[in-house]
Image: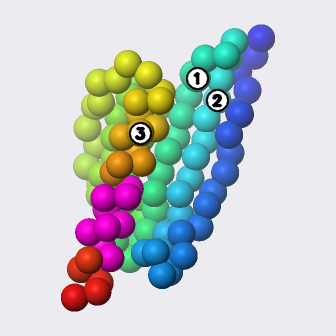
Amino acid sequence: MAEKRIIDQSMMISRKRGDGTLRYEVWEENGAVTRYNLAYMNHLIFSGDNGRVVGYDNRHGHHRHFKGVVEPVETTSFEEIEERFRQDWTKVLEEYNAQRNR
């Protein structure tokens, strides 16, 4: 069976919640995730890297992008990466909103 994209979606975060876009792309083959690209983009927080504040992908091995810095990530599953991503982008938004509301 050939690799197939199973998720391809972008979700806008409202200005009230902090603004930005969440991007999810996931491919699988034979029921296993083979490729992924998860990104939170917000040019108000970080203008480099096309606005990607935080992201995870496995194009060149599992790695994390954070405000222009790329670092390898040890992982045991895609679900673990997905949870790390969720924690990262929600923390960034909480910090951004706290700073914005001072």
Secondary structure of residue under mark 2: strand
Which sits earlier in the primary sequence, circle 2 or circle 3?
2
**Residue found 58% across the figure and 23% down from its top:** 33
The nearer-to-camera label among 2 and 3 is 3
Q: Which residues are magenta?
A: 89-97
Residue 46 shows in the view: no
**Residue type, label 2:** Trp
**Mark 2–mark 3 distance (CA, rounded to whole Å):** 17 Å
Q: Position of residue 17 (x, y in %)?
A: 46, 75
Query: Could you say where residue 80 lies in the image, as x and y percent from the top left?
Result: 40, 30
Q: Look at the numbered discs 2 and 1 and tell me whether their residues touch, using CB distance below 8 Å.
A: yes
Amino acid residing under circle 1: Val
Q: Find disc 2 in the rendering and name its residue.
A: 27
Question: Tag 3, which secondary structure?
Answer: helix
34 sits left or right of 52 in the view: right
Name the residue rendered at 31%, 58% in the picture: 91
Circle 3 sits on which residue? Answer: 83
Three-letter code, disc 3: Glu
Picture residue at 48% right of the left edge, 81% below the top: 16
User: Please, is residue 9 above or below residue 17 in the view?
Assistant: above
Q: Earlier in the sequence, mark 3 or mark 1?
A: 1
